[in-house]
Image (tube, grey):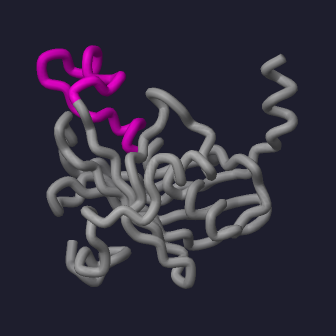
């Protein structure tokens, strides 16, 4: 993939600079415990609707024991969950959708291009292409050590929090 095909040139962000830590992410995202798939946000551009975040993969990730025992690799669905959480964070932080919660609406043209292992930093770049009251469309690219390991399009939909809470009762 050429540099012109990248959402954001890597020279524009520094994965060692934290602009939002886990506590700030929790202000916008409801996921907790093993479902938190972001460690920090390292870049935000509200004018272009682009965010970069990452997940530092430790030795105790919930999927390690069972996903390819002896040779653990990050499941593609967990990679996509990281993307969804970053897209939701950006949409809510930039006030692009009037929604308390944003859920998965679909995936399109997703390609897994590399293996992600415990001990690595999984970097996600998201560009919110479209954000309307009923739908969010995000282009994403994911990297490990500068190599693209996943890319595609994600759709998000607003979830009515009161309906979700009433169903839990």
The quadrant of the image that shows the N terminus is: bottom left
Above or below: residue 144 compared with residue 77: below
Instruction: Tell me: 52 left or right of 85.
Output: left
Quadrant in which residue 167 is drawn: top right
Q: Give how far across and how far down residue 158 sits, in percent.
A: 74, 51
Q: Nearer the viewer, residue 80 or 91?
A: 91
Is 76 magenta? The answer is: yes
Query: At which x and y percent is residue 120?
Result: 19, 44
Residue 153: x %, y % from top left: 48, 59
For the point 57% across and 56% down, which residue is it?
89
Relative side of 122 to 162, left or right: left
Question: Which percent across, then down, holds residue 129?
Answer: 56, 73
- The residue under the point 26% across, 38% down is 57
Residue 84 in view: yes
**Magenta residues, as a range?**
59-79
At a point 62% along the width and 50% down the height, the residue shown is 27
Q: Quadrant of the C terminus?
A: top right
Residue 43: which quarter of the image?
Answer: bottom left
Q: Nearer the viewer, residue 134 or 32?
A: 32
Which residue is depicted at the point 30% across and 56% down? Answer: 123
Q: Relative to 29, is 167 above or below?
A: above
């Amino acid at each position: 993939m050429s540099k012109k095909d990248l959402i954001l040139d890597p020279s524009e962000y520094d994965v060692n600079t934290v602009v939002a830590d886990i506590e700030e992410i929790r202000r916008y995202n409801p996921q907790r415990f093993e479902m938190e798939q972001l460690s920090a946000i390292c870049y935000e551009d509200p004018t272009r609707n682009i965010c970069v975040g990452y997940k530092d993969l430790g030795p105790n990730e919930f999927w390690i024991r069972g996903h390819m025992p002896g040779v653990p690799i990050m499941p593609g669905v967990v990679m996509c969950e990281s993307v969804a959480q970053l897209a939701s964070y950006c949409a809510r932080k930039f006030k692009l959708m009037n929604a308390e919660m944003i859920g998965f609406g679909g995936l399109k043209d997703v390609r897994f291009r590399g293996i992600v292992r415990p001990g690595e930093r999984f970097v996600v770049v998201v560009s919110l292409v479209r954000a309307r009251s009923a739908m969010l469309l995000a282009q994403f690219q994911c990297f490990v050590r500068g190599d693209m390991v996943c890319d595609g399009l994600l759709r998000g939909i607003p979830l009515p929090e009161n309906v979700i809470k009433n169903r839990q009762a």
